[in-house]
Image (cartoon, rainbow, N blue to C red):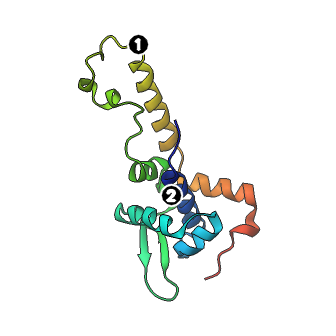
Amino acid sequence: MKLSTRVRYGARAMVDLGVAFPDGTVSVRDIAQREGVSAKYLEQIVSRLKAAGLIVAHRGVQGGYSLARPPASISLNDIYHVLEGDTAPTDCVDEPGACPMKNVCPTRDTWVELKESIENVLQNTSLQDLVERKGQKVGPHCLMYHI
């Protein structure tokens, strides 16, 4: 299973916003520059996150985006479902009726277990966990925001 760039970039952008939480706003341009991604593509991702209520936009000179709620209350699962949808590796996991082999297929149970495992990891990883990991990996001197 490969994660799309939409999920990878979206998660990294959310971590960036999590670092600035609760007092800071961050522009898409700044996130894109720090993360080395296209600002235009990131704007599309941020638009989805905003529509889902995970982030809020702020207008004005010091405008940008911020998290809509604390990073500890946002799971990686929340982000994944907004940007990618379902975690099921095959259609038969969520729609058993889609496959006439559902009762005799030797692999379906494995695909169900895979989805459950993925969901478990995503649900049990909060944005706060990722913010803390980033702090451990790059050090606190790289995480300073000036408002």
Q: Position of residue 85 (x, y in %)?
A: 37, 46
Report helix, strand or loop for mark 1. loop
Alpha-carbon span between mark 1 and mark 2: 35 Å
The residue tagged 2 is 10
Looking at the picture, tell me which residue is in the foreground, 13 or 33. Answer: 33
Specify whether 15 is left or right of 114.
Answer: right
**What secondary structure is found at the residue carrying circle 2?**
helix
In which quadrant of the rendered image does the C terminus lie?
A: bottom right
Q: Residue at x 33, y 10 (%)?
A: 104
Q: What residue type is labelled 1?
A: Pro
Farthest top residue in view: 104
Q: Work out whether residue 110 or residue 39 is closer to the camera in this orientation and state it.
A: 39
User: Would you identify the image quadrant in which residue 119 lies?
Assistant: top left
Q: Give the mark nearer the N terminus: 1 vs 2.
A: 2
Residue 68 vertical position relative to residue 100 in the rendered view, above or below:
below
* Disc 1: CA contacts within 10 A as few (<14), some (14-19) or many (>=20): few
